[in-house]
């Protein structure tokens, strides 16, 4: 891999073409923040994964978790390690080469180089092993299993979908490299084309500079119940890396139109996805890059990189603030919503996972129920939310467990809640639905409030789901959830208008 083309002189037309070509490859350039759907827990990557922006995180049996692998220590300027024969001349990444590109990236971004960046080129299989090991270290046991249950209960993934396996399959063919804050090392895959390697190197070195100035590992560390804030930070991290990468590769990130980038990311993600990849996971993969790029470009238009630096000093606290600059300027907080209760389900049910969805994840979820414009409009009225995954163990059958989901939302106005209600009605109708595998699902909206309940349903050994509840029970539970506390903290106008 060489540095050719990085920061070279190009005409405006060719710059735009190069920017478009670079943007069209994100699914191939994928590296991640611990699998975007795992919620930006720590690995900093260079293309669309997940977040996460997908909904939940949770608890589950260790047998379902990805196995960790022993990670070899990083080697500066090392050749490829692991699977397959690779041309050493093409694969070698020297310390001097990294230093040259790092200097160009630092100049373009305006961040200081505080230390050298270690690098290692690895085979694709070993890269994936390191990702698995990282997830094993960073994500609490069972999180992926209960994330699966929340997505399944809302019909965002099929009831029998192998969520953990699917995420790794999705990642395996895409990952091109990642920056690991824990050991301050940049890892690249050994089979990249020259253009992919050029883009990945520039992008990952932005992450290295971010880590040196802002301590990424701590900012992106997994914290239960903190997904929306993590998603907002993740988007800033990736959006800035995209913007600076384009500056380095084609002279200016403003050669890339934000709407075009969204279309290219969506197309490349869809074309390169594993055949059974649910739409919500595809959308979650690209959101940190596209939403983050729009956010950073908006800051740069107003105040250059100094405005981006200011965002690092006062990070967006919600994805609502990330998506709406006026909300960030006002530091508008989310409405505080209590964890939904489940007394109506009877004894034995306990909350095993609870979190905030946030506007970005709500938009991605609604996009599975309606066309994108309707989803964006309905999610834009978000004011605050909290959902809970509940579980009841079977004393007579240790392999059998029941699951259910409750979700309480507060919108900015009754009109906003009604708009969200149209999306729910389109997908689930007005009345409670009893589903053969997932049990009942029911929702209601009153004023600016909405509540949704799904389940209970049972699984034996984590396998096939079967209904374990009735609509009569769901309606009683729905009324209980709707009574839960949702109040507007100081500065939040709960009756405010549309964004």
Image (spheres, rainbow, N blue to C red):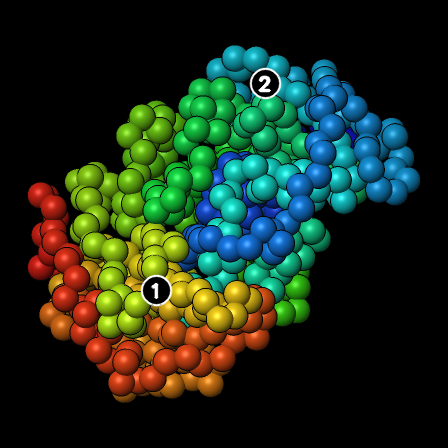
Q: Is residue 196 left or right of residue 467?
A: right
- Evaluate whether residue 463 shows in this view: yes
Residue 26 lies left or right of residue 60; in this view the side is right
Q: Residues within 10 Å of mark 2 (few under 14, many from 20)?
A: some
The residue labelled by disc 2 is 103
Which image quadrant is residue 264 in?
Answer: bottom right
Circle 1: element type:
loop
The quadrant of the rendering that contains the C terminus is bottom left
Q: Secondary structure at mark 2?
A: helix
Residue ranking furthest to the top? 114
Q: Position of residue 312 (x, y in %)?
A: 35, 29
The residue lying toward the viewer, choosing from 243 and 436, is 436
* Residue plotted at (49% across, 20% down): 212
Residue to which mark 1 is pinned: 349
**Residue 249 to residue 374: above or below:** above
Mark 1, residues whose alpha carbon is within 10 Å: few (<14), some, or many (≥20)? many
Q: Nearer the viewer, mark 2 or mark 1?
A: 1
Whether residues under marks 2 and 1 lie with C-beta atoms below 8 angstroms apart, the answer is: no
Is 284 in front, or is 152?
152
The residue located at (82%, 37%) in the rendering is: 82
The percent position of residue 446, horizontal first and vertical second, equals 14, 73
Q: Is residue 156 visible?
A: no
Above or below for 154 versus 7: below
Give whichever of 73, 298 is nearer the camera: 73
Q: Looking at the picture, how far across and down is residue 328, in whole percent?
A: 24, 41
Q: Quadrant of residue 392?
A: bottom left
Q: Is residue 337 left or right of residue 35?
A: left
**Which quarter shows the N terminus?**
top right
Q: Earlier in the sequence, mark 2 or mark 1?
A: 2
Q: Residue at x 37, y 80 (%)?
A: 469
């Amino acid at each position: 891999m060489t540095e050719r083309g990085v920061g070279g002189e190009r005409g405006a037309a060719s710059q735009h073409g190069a920017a478009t070509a670079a943007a069209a490859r994100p699914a191939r350039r994928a590296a991640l923040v611990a699998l975007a759907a795992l919620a930006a827990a720590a690995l900093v990557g260079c293309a669309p994964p997940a977040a996460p922006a997908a909904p939940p995180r949770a608890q589950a049996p260790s047998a379902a978790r990805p196995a960790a692998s022993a990670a070899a220590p990083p080697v500066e300027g090392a050749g490829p390690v692991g699977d397959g024969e690779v041309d050493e001349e093409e694969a070698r990444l020297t310390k001097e080469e990294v230093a040259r590109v790092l200097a160009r990236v630092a100049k373009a971004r305006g961040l200081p180089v505080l230390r050298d960046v270690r690098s290692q080129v690895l085979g694709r299989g070993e890269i994936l092993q390191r990702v698995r090991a990282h997830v094993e270290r960073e994500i609490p046991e069972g999180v992926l299993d209960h994330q699966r249950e929340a997505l399944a209960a809302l019909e965002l993934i099929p009831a029998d979908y192998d969520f953990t396996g699917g995420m790794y399959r999705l990642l395996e063919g895409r990952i091109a490299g990642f920056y690991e804050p824990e050991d301050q090392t940049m890892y690249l895959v050994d089979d990249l084309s020259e253009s992919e390697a050029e883009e990945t190197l520039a992008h990952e070195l932005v992450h290295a500079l971010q880590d040196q100035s802002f301590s990424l590992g701590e900012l992106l560390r997994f914290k239960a119940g903190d997904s929306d804030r993590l998603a907002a930070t993740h988007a800033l991290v990736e959006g800035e890396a995209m913007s600076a990468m384009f500056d380095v590769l084609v002279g200016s990130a403003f050669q890339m139109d934000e709407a075009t980038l969204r279309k290219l990311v969506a197309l490349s993600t869809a074309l390169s996805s594993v055949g059974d990849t649910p739409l919500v996971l595809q959308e979650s993969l690209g959101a940190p890059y596209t939403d983050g790029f729009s956010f950073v470009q908006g800051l740069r238009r107003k105040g250059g990189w100094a405005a981006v630096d200011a965002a690092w000093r006062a990070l967006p606290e919600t994805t609502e603030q990330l998506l709406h600059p006026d909300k960030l300027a006002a530091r508008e907080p989310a409405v505080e919503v209590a964890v939904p209760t489940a007394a109506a389900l009877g004894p034995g049910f306990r909350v095993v996972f609870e979190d905030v969805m946030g506007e970005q994840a709500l938009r991605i979820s609604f996009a599975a129920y309606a066309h994108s414009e309707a989803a964006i409009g309905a999610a834009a009225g978000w004011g605050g939310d909290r959902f809970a995954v509940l579980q009841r163990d079977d004393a007579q059958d240790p392999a059998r467990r029941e699951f259910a989901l409750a979700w309480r939302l507060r919108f900015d106005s009754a009109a906003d809640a009604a708009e969200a209600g149209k999306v729910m009605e389109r997908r689930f109708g007005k009345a409670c639905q009893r589903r053969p595998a997932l049990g009942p699902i029911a929702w209601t909206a009153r004023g600016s409030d909405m509540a949704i309940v799904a389940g209970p349903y049972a699984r034996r050994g984590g396998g096939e789901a079967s209904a374990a509840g009735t609509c009569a029970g769901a309606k009683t539970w729905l009324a209980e959830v709707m009574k839960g506390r949702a109040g507007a903290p100081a500065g939040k106008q709960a009756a405010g208008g549309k964004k």
